[in-house]
Image (cartoon, rainbow, N blue to C red):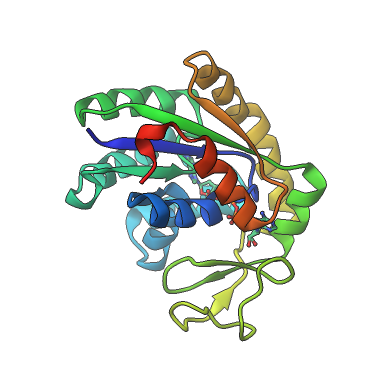
Amino acid sequence: MPRYILLVGPPGAGKGTQAKRLCQALGLLHVSSGDLFREHLKNQTELGKLAQSHIDRGELVPDDVTIAMVRERLQQEDAAAGAILDGFPRTLAQAKALDGLLEELGGGVDAVVNIQVSMTALVRRLTGRWMCRQAGHIYHQEFNPPRKPGVCDIDGSELYRRSDDTEQTVAKRFQVYLEQTAPLIKHYRSKGVVIDVNGEQKIGAVTAAVLDVLPGDVSP
Ligand code: ADP
Ligand code: AMP
């Protein structure tokens, strides 16, 4: 039966960072809606152009296109064992669509990892974040610096600052998170699948804490 783990938390909580580490530990596919949009943007597809206007304003991309994009990704062969979803769902409509989709795929939401980080720390994380062009590997100038400034340790590609990590867009993204995404945690809490994790520890300690509390049947 495929396994699905969701990572939720405000922008900068460490969802992408933890998703990559957890996928390695658990042998699951990493599905990040933000990365999928950025890939479309890089390839200048119609979806990429549509998404860009929303992303640059710090708003959510409309539910219908987001759901269709994630649906297509989860139906691919490399997702047969399940996935760690990072940044999806972000609205109640997306959560309901995901429930239906996972049922079709023969699974369900095994765990929702809620990464908790204070507002002050989030701002420092986002304003110091660097990302690689090739594959979206994530760095921080202070907390997780690359060995060589401006170059990805893993694939050697150039590091760049995300255009939506500016102070103004970050403020809007926090507002959108509180209004549209935070209520999802309540939705999943009522299903008994939420695991709260202190995201204000070192990166490795957060990963260890998550692996420690995940339901036994999803550990390696
Ligand atoms: P999200 O996907 O939730 O937006 P990221 O994984 O991109 O967050 O992390 C945001 C920034 O914070 C990145 O620069 C990352 O290197 C850094 N970061 C992630 N986890 C931690 C942590 N536990 N401590 C310090 N910095 C972190
Ligand atoms: P992220 O990489 O998760 O920080 O996402 C970057 C941006 O992509 C967000 O601010 C949104 O504009 C868009 N985005 C990512 N995931 C979603 C989603 N599930 N629903 C709507 N928009 C999204």
Nearest to the observer: residue 164 or residue 218: 218
Q: Position of residue 202 (x, y in %)?
A: 69, 56
The reply, left or right, for residue 173 in relation to residue 47 is right
Quadrant of res 218: top left
Question: Can residue 190 be seen?
Answer: yes
- Outermost residue, top side: 190
Nearest to the observer: residue 196 or residue 43: 196
Above or below for 32 versus 150 = above
The reply, left or right, for residue 68 in relation to residue 135 is left
How many numbered marks have been drawn onto this rendered protein structure? 0
Nearest to the observer: residue 77 or residue 46: 77
Quadrant of res 143: bottom right
- Outermost residue, left side: 77
- Residue for point 38% across, 28% down: 109
Q: Position of residue 55 (x, y in %)?
A: 55, 51
Question: Can residue 49 be seen?
Answer: no
- Residue for point 73% across, 50% down: 122
Q: Position of residue 104 (x, y in %)?
A: 20, 27
Above or below for 41 versus 123 = below
Quarter of the image where the N terminus is located: top left
Above or below for 134 versus 83 = below
Q: Position of residue 162 (x, y in %)?
A: 60, 64
- Residue for point 71% across, 72% down: 141
- Residue for point 58% across, 73% down: 160
